[in-house]
Image (spheres, rainbow, N blue to C red):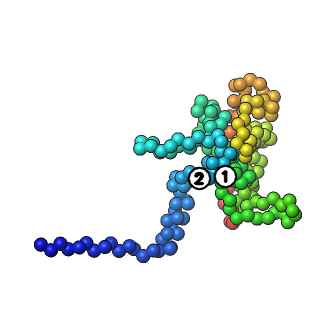
Amino acid sequence: MEIMAKKPKRNKPFDPAEAARIEYERRRNPERWGANEEALRLASNGTVQSEAETRTKTRRITRFDCFALLHQREGITSDQLTAVRRLQGDIAIRYRVDGEAGVRLVVDQSSSAEMVTARSLDAGKRVDEALAEIGPLSKEILLRLSEPEVINGQQVNWRAAVQTVTGEAHPHGQSALVRAACENLRLAYAEIDKQPRRAA
């Protein structure tokens, strides 16, 4: 009996347009982005805990700070925590500690010129826009609790920070002030998201 050899499978020709479409869809879907490993190695992400993927659980990456603690204790809602993480994400981009280099622009031609990116400038505008809507006290609380950890990876004694900003010494009062700041931020983002998008 003669055995017929299998014909080798032919690979489909490479279609750059299809590859670009797939990449575009991947970038549009945050659930498929995965972790930015370069960013996780930065000192500024020292408060980020990464739980490895197992056969039964997907990988979990959590920033453990006062906001995560308050959320865990049901002191702030998931929507409030999401608003804080959105602000912190833009702060990280603004100060270029998010692990993505981007295309650099020289703002000033002097020898001490600071290199920034178009992306960091946009993030700075978003930070300023959100903070302008929440009032000076909430703004100061959120910046005192976010910037040291996001930019320098420094652990913040959040109760001491809130007391310095507000003078409030009682733990329940401190938690209430952080909760109010988070809610003000959530409301600010809700209003910002209602606005029509500006053309680039």
Residue 197 seen by the camera: yes
In the rendered image of this protein, does residue 1 appear above or below residue 137? Answer: below
The kind of secondary structure element at disc 2 is loop
Q: Amino acid at mark 1?
A: Asp
Q: Amino acid at mark 2?
A: Asn
The kind of secondary structure element at disc 1 is loop
Identified at 73% across, 61% down, the residue is: 117
Q: Which residue is mark 1?
A: 98
Residue furthest to the left: 1
Residue 154 appears in which quarter of the rendering? Answer: top right
Q: How many marks?
A: 2
Q: Which residue is mark 2?
A: 36
Identified at 79% across, 64% down, the residue is: 106
Dot 2 alpha-carbon crowd within 10 angstroms: few under 14, some 14 to 19, many 20 or more: few
**Residue 152: numbered disc:** none
Residue 139: % across, % down: 76, 42
Identified at 70% across, 36% down, the residue is: 155
Q: Nearer the viewer, residue 63 or 188?
A: 63
